Amino acid sequence: MHMLEHQLATNRMRELQAEAMAASRARRLYLARRSARRAERAVRRAARASAAVF
């Protein structure tokens, strides 16, 4: 019986670790996309400012 409880606890811990890793990957992807959008906007702003000067 003790072995079964140990197996269940170990499996549950693995599931939680997998969920945490997936959440971490999703957050990193979200942050990367957000910073890419910010960079694109900065490039467009810089291009407009440069065009306004010339």
Image (cartoon, rainbow, N blue to C red):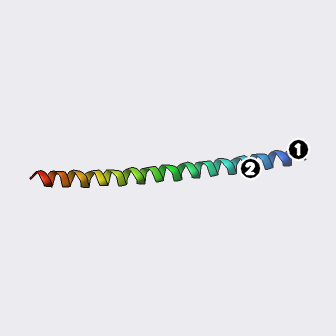
Instruction: Please identify the quarter of the rendering in which residue 47 is found.
Output: bottom left
The residue under label 1 is 2
Q: Residue at x 69, y 51 (%)?
A: 15
Q: Residues within 10 Å of mark 2 (few under 14, many from 20)?
A: few
48, above or below 10, in the image: below
Location of residue 34 in the rendering, given as x and y in whole percent from the top left corner: 41, 52
Kind of residue at disc 2: Arg
Instruction: Please identify the quarter of the rendering in which residue 33 is found.
Output: bottom left
- Marks 2 and 1, how far apart at CA: 15 Å
Left or right position of 42 against 34: left
Q: Secondary structure at mark 1?
A: helix
Q: Residue at x 47, y 53 (%)?
A: 30
The residue under label 2 is 12
Q: Secondary structure at mark 2?
A: helix
Q: Residue at x 85, y 45 (%)?
A: 3
Location of residue 50 in the rendering, given as x and y in whole percent from the top left corner: 15, 51
Which residue occupies the extreme right position in the image?
1
